[in-house]
Image (spheres, grey):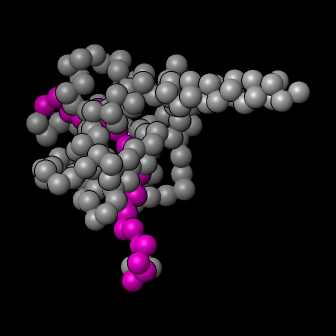
Amino acid sequence: SPGDEDYIHFIVSDVFVRLGSLEEGGKPMTGWYRVGKAVAGDYTDIRSSLSLQQGLIFWTAVHMYPQLAAKGNKAAKALQLGICPPSMMMADECDGALDEEEAEDIIVSPRAPISPDVSLSLCGFRPDFNPAGFTYKRRESAALKKKTDRLAEMKDAS
C-alpha cells in the first residue's frame, strides 16, 4: 500500500504498433498489433518511458510481425505506438492485427518530453513473444557457463 515504507509505485501498459498514414489525416495502413507490456516505476510518466523505449519497441514489432516491415523504409516513418490499460492478454506468433472492436481502447501515445531525471532503470518493455532468431545472449551464455561450472564441481566432488 502507498503508506508502506517499501512501497514502489509503478504503471503498466499494454503496447501496440501499427503503420499509420503517410499522408496527414489519411487512413492507417494496418491495424494495431499487440507487441508487449511497458512499465514505468517511481512515478515516472508512462509516456516518457515509451518515448525512451520507442526505438526498441518499433524494432521488436517489425521483427515480430513481418507485415509491418513489408512496406519498406518509407513506411517505417509512419509507425505509431499505441497504449491501453494493462490486461492479461498476450500476443501469439500466429496473431494478426486486432479487429476494430478489440482496438477500441487503444490510444496513440503522444511523444512525451523526457526530463533529465528520467532513468532507463525506471522503465521496462517486455515483448509478448520473442521474434524468430531473437535471443538473450548475455543471460544464456551466463547460464550455460554456470551449468558447466556446477557440472565441473560435481565431477571434482566424486
Q: Is residue 36 left or right of residue 89?
A: left
Could you tell me residue 47's position as x and y percent? 24, 53
Q: Quadrant of the C terminus?
A: top right
How far across and down, in percent of the image, does residue 76 sit? 24, 25
From this view, report whether residue 146 is shown above or below residue 102: above
Residue that appears at 27% across and 33% down: 55
Report whether 144 appears left or right of 45. right
Question: Where on the picture, by quarter, is residue 65?
Answer: top left
Residue 128 in the image: state x and y as whole percent. 51, 41
Q: Residue at x 31, y 63 (%)?
A: 42
Above or below for 59 versus 34: above
- Which quarter of the rendering shows the N terminus? bottom left
Q: Residue at x 43, y 48 (%)?
A: 37
Q: Residue at x 28, y 56 (%)?
A: 46
| Residue 20 in magenta stretch | yes
Is residue 89 magenta-colored? Answer: no
Q: Nearer the viewer, residue 137 or 83?
A: 137
Rendering coords of residue 151 (x, y %): 76, 26
Residue 148 sits in which quadrant?
top right
Q: Nearer the viewer, residue 155 or 114?
A: 155
Q: Which residues are magenta?
A: 3-23
Horizontal side, residue 72 vs residue 22: left or right: right
